[in-house]
Amino acid sequence: MKRSTTWAKKILKGFIVAVFWVAVWEIAALAVNKEVLVADPFTVVKRLLDLGATSDFWISTGTSVLRILFGFILAVLAGTLMACLTSRLETVNALFSPLTAVIKATPVASFIILALVWIDKGNIPSFTSFLMVFPIVWGNVHQGIKQVNKGLKEVAKVYEMPLSKRISKLYIPSVLPFFSSALLTGLGLGWKAGIAAEVLCTPKNSIGEQLYSAKIYLETTDVFAWTLVVIVLSFIIEKLLAYIIRKVVAVRGHRT
């Protein structure tokens, strides 16, 4: 009963917040009174429903999600592997740690423009997503590994604890909070950077291509509709990832 009441309060709160911002949007549209500058929210929703009835909408949306998530998953795997290497080998850390600073300091647009020279434009969203997520995962996992209690590591060494148990009992509990944080932060950045890459390089069958086309032809309603798609997808994917992380943490806590 208490849980259902909590959920009802959350839903009501979310509804009130949504109504408030839709009202602000409607007021702004009425004040400007030019659809080419600010589209009316109800017109945008109607246009979104019209787009959702077409196969092109789902092909573009699905392709963009797959491209960006592919880069994200590769970054998670590569960043975790690099963190393990750099935390173990100081020479490797000294050689490759400047790479993180370079990636963080370089504007996303610069990477996208350079990537247009190097690789096929259909792979650029994945490449951009990878670049945004990789240093975050690497840095967080590296920090998590370094946080493992030295005393416990010595005890494990003295009692010749198998590597599998060291990983499951010492390293995973220490790294998991850092890893979870990296996933949630990286996903948001990777998603936005991937969409930005699509807008700049316009690969076929993508959200970015649709946004660019709408902008070129001054179809402001379409721009708002596709932007709304980007926001909703970001929210759904992040909530789904957060749910999976909570379940994994709960299962590990139960096993412990």
Image (spheres, helix red, strand yellow):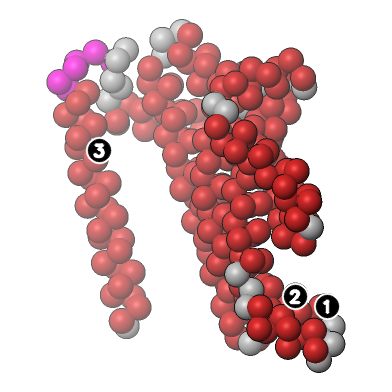
- Which of these two is toward me, 55 or 229? 229
Give the class, few, some or many, for how many residues have Cα within 10 Å of label 3's Cα (few <14, many ≥20): some
**Relative side of 6 to 101, left or right:** left
Q: Amino acid at mark 3?
A: Val
Q: Which mark is residue 6?
A: none
Give the class, few, some or many, for how many residues have Cα within 10 Å of label 1's Cα (few <14, many ≥20): few
Q: Which residue is mark 1?
A: 163
Residues shaded magenta: 30-35
The residue mark sitting in front, 3 or 1, is 1
Q: Is residue 77 visible?
A: no
Q: What residue is drawn where x is 53% and y is 54%?
A: 184
In the rendering, at what x and y percent does residue 192 appear?
Answer: 52, 35
Secondary structure at numbered mark 3:
helix
Cβ atoms under marks 1 and 2 closer than 8 Å: yes
Q: Which residue is mark 3?
A: 22
Q: Is residue 97 visible?
A: yes
Q: Residue furthest top?
A: 217
Q: Amino acid at mark 2?
A: Ile
Q: Which residue is mark 2?
A: 167
Q: What residue is drawn where x is 48% and y is 9%?
A: 216
Q: Amino acid at mark 1?
A: Leu
Q: Quadrant of residue 112?
A: top right
Q: Earlier in the sequence, mark 2 or mark 3?
A: 3
Q: CA distance from mark 1 to mark 2?
A: 6 Å
Q: Quadrant of residue 203?
A: top right
